[in-house]
Image (cartoon, grey):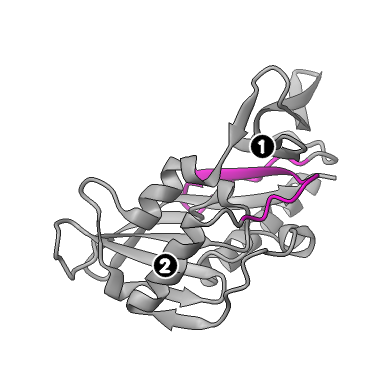
Amino acid sequence: MRSSILHLLSLFLVVAFAASCGKNSSKSASNTNASSTYTDTGSSSGQVAYDSLKAWHDSTSDNTQLGIHGIYLKKSVSSFFVPQMCLKNTTVVDCVDPTGCFKSTDTGVMVGVVEMNRTTFLGITSKKYGDCNITNTFTPYLKKNNVELSEAVLGSSGKFLIKSLTQKSNSIYKVFYGSFSGSITPTSYAVINISLPSIVNPTEVGQINGSQISKGVVLLNYQIVN
């Protein structure tokens, strides 16, 4: 019963996430996330919006303040079923391991390895999030080295920026790409939420075929771990 309720809650959160084009993916994240050090707010579009996004990308501003320990789940969404991310203090049978974790320390933001706690009873394994191991794999994170984010902001091979279509609503940016240089017909897009740590961005990528939009990898959940 508890697992079913958590599944319904997870589905509600993702629907809310999609409706807001990339807002914080859970109430918990929006309530506890450190305030942004990048204060650009309001709405704009086109070149102005794109220039604002690129300025944030090029800056050192981020939301990974000292002491933050975060976990997140980024997966492809291809069906109505939405996976539930395993949390630290909740043991369930069918949750999904976080796809990433990080800790912000005196030496910078460190990318860790997700460690899970598992227990088996009568052949059924329950699990919950354990910790983010940054000791065995010492991997520092820098926003400028986030390849996915850089490709979202700057474009990549076969994905040419259409800057005139860029949309900005407060901390949420949506960037569109064409299949060739100079194209004004979008074939793909990305969503960036600068109120979240850059390490979890982009929060959504997808394809566009006429009026049909197909989501690719989506940030389904982001939690600050106490």
Q: Are marks 2 and 1 in contact (CB under 8 Å)?
A: no
Res. 169 mark:
none
* Label located before the other in sequence (2 or 1): 1
Whole-percent x, y for residue 78 in the image: 42, 49
Q: Name the image quarter holding residue 46.
A: bottom left
Q: Is residue 59 above or below residue 20?
A: above
Q: Secondary structure at mark 1?
A: strand
Whole-percent x, y for residue 124 in the image: 75, 23
Q: Is residue 2 magenta?
A: no
- At x 37% / y 65%, what residue is drawn? 175
Distance between mark 2 and mark 1 Cα atoms: 25 Å
Secondary structure mostly taken by the magenta-highlighted segment of the chain = loop
Whole-percent x, y for residue 179 in the image: 17, 56
Residue at which label 2 appears: 174
Label 1: how many Cα within 10 Å (few below 14, some 14–19, many 20+): many
Per the rendered image, the range of residues in magenta is: 62-87
Residue at which label 1 appears: 101
Q: Amino acid at mark 2?
A: Lys
45 sits left or right of 146 in the view:
left
Q: Amino acid at mark 1?
A: Cys
Q: Is residue 184 above or below residue 151?
A: below
Q: Is residue 73 above or below residue 181?
A: above
48 sits left or right of 164 in the view:
right
